[in-house]
Each structure stands twice: as structure tokens, then as C-alpha cells.
Image (cartoon, rainbow, N blue to C red):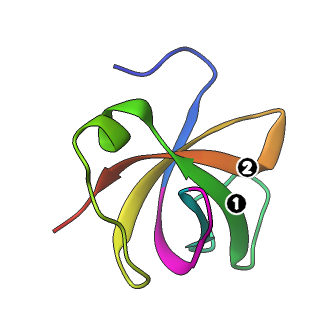
Amino acid sequence: MLKPGVIEVEGEVTEALPNTMFRVAVAPGQLPSIEEQKIVLCHLSGKMRINYVRILPGDKVRVEMTPYDLTKGRITFRYR
């Protein structure tokens, strides 16, 4: 269940950074008014930290973002 105003997109992790931060490449056409690939700085959601979900570069993930800042997001799901 999404909160109102949250944008949910799918992307691929390109780089793992310290403190459970990741760079995620979002495919073109998923974000409104953006035609080229976009790099988003993301952190893990609380449930993923509690359950020790491991994220590696190359993983497909679901990212939540607010419409106010499309450069930062939260990783909420890792696809198999």
C-alpha cells in the first residue's frame, strides 16, 4: 500500500556505497517528464535492514521516491 504522492519505479543497482546506500539506474520512461536514464541515490527501507536483505550491484529493485526530490529514494523490494 503506497502513501499518496509517492512515485514507485523499478531500476537496477549500479554501485554499492557505504552505510547501505546505493546508486540505482532508473530506466527511461518510468519517471514523469524524463526521457533519458536517471541515477538515483537510494537507501534501504527499515524492513529490508531488519531482515538482512542483501543488495548487490546488478540486482533489480523497486524504489519509492517523493515528487519533491527525484534524485533520492528508498529501496523497498529486491526482485529475484
Please say if 11 is above or below 2.
below
Is 30 or 53 nearer to us in this picture?
Answer: 53
The image position of residue 76, as x and y in percent, is 39, 43
Q: Residue 72 shows which numbered tag?
A: 2
**Badge 2 vs badge 1, beta-carbon distance below 8 Å:** yes
* Left or right position of 68 against 75: right
Q: Please report the residue visible at 38 percent of the width from the left and 77 percent of the height from the top.
A: 56
Seen in the picture, residue 41 relative to 35 is either above or below; the reply is above
Instruction: Tell me the element at label 1.
Output: strand
Q: Position of residue 19 (x, y in %)?
A: 60, 56
Residue at image position (44%, 83%) is 57
Other residues around mark 1 within 10 Å, as few (<14) / some (14–19) / many (≥20): some
Q: What stretch is highlighted in magenta?
A: 10-19
Tell which circle, 2 or 1, labels the residue nearer the N-terminal end: 1
Q: In this view, does 15 lie to the left or right of 37?
A: left
To which residue does mark 1 refer?
41
* Magenta residue check for 80: no
Q: Which amino acid does label 1 sit on?
A: Leu
SS at mark 2 in the image:
strand
Q: In which quarter of the image is residue 27?
A: bottom right
Task: Check the picture and name the quadrant holding the C terminus.
Answer: bottom left
